[in-house]
Amino acid sequence: MSRPGERNDGRKGRNPAGKPPFRPRPQTASDDWIWGWHAVEAALANERRGPPVRLIATADRARQLEARFGRIRALEIADANTVARTLPPGAVHQGIALRPGPLPDVDLADFEARPGAVLLMLDQVTDPQNVGAILRSAAAFGAAGVILQERHAPRFTGALAKAAAGAVDAIPIARAVNLSRALEQLARAGWRSVGLAGQAERPLSEVLGGEPVVLVLGSEGEGVRRLVAEHCDALAKIPMPGGFESLNVSAAAAVALYEAVRNRA
């Protein structure tokens, strides 16, 4: 059963006699593209990425790119319809599309546990739009980084990069196979972890201090999983006097980040 705001990719199709069962759509070349000016500009400016594989832009966008970066070997000039045909249907490309070089992940040990530092950890948040919006908020509020699961997290291409508006390349991102073990490693390095849970007794403002903190957010519907929550030093809630039971996970992340920044001001 799908959850609000989250895609359920584990669909099962009908299996009439003589027909194979449903299989998820395989990755295609179009899945490796990112599009939109801010996402492409940030990827090209990121020195940690490898060189671009392909770059397609309209003539106007090509002039903007060359004014910003100088001559780009991979650049191909094409009309807007050609750019659109390269990408998944409905992609709002703004006349530019990039098949970028790989973006290396950050290691957990690279996050320095300095006073006031904030990390976000996402527990099985799989919707690209949500993850993109969360990355954008993390960059806007000066988070030290974001930690995702190795398997239950979207790839950093397409719709996610567009929603993040360049934040994919602006904020350090680490992936962990096991989030509970990742929290243990971070705890040894001096980080305190706080899980966001609607059933928690204390509001987030009362739980936060000046120490380096990992804010753990779960998927909509399920929330932070039990084992991950048990590895948090505290659970806290975002007070909602208006009567709604929960916020979209990207909205909750923005509120939590604001509270963490305000707490340290």
Image: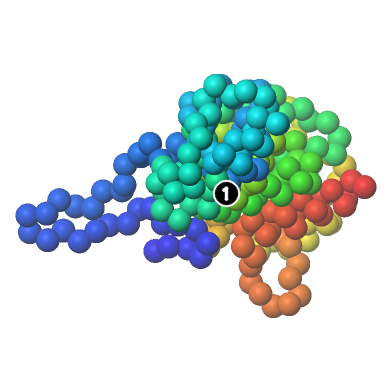
**Residue 159 visible, this orientation:** no
Q: Could you tell me which residue is drawn at 64 percent across and 35 percent down?
A: 63
Residue drawn at point x = 27 percent, y = 57 percent: 12
**Quadrant location of the N terminus in the rendered image:** bottom left
Which of the pair 186/233 is nearer the observer? 186
- In the image, farthest residue toward the left: 18
Q: Position of residue 199 (x, y in %)?
A: 65, 64
**Residue 70, position as x, y percentages in the image:** 67, 24
Q: Is residue 252 above or below residue 63?
A: below
The residue sitting at 48% across, 44% down in the picture is 79
**In the rendered view, does 195 fall on the left or right side of 181?**
right
Q: Is residue 196 left or right of residue 31?
A: right
Residue at the far right in the pictured view: 265
The answer to which image quadrant residue 187 occupies is top right
Label 1 crowd (10 A; few <14 / some 14-19 / many >=20): some
Task: Examine the rendered structure and indicate whether residue 1 appears above or below residue 57.
Answer: below
Q: Pointer 1: what residue?
A: 94
Q: Secondary structure at mark 1?
A: loop
* 225 on left or right of 184: left
Instruction: Give percent across and percent down for residue 93.
Output: 53, 48
Determine the residue located farthest toward the bottom in the rendered image: 243
Q: Quick check: 4 above or below 23?
A: below
Query: Is residue 241 left or right of 63 when viewed as pictured?
Result: right
The amino acid marked with disc number 1 is Gln
Q: Residue at x 76, y 67 (%)?
A: 239
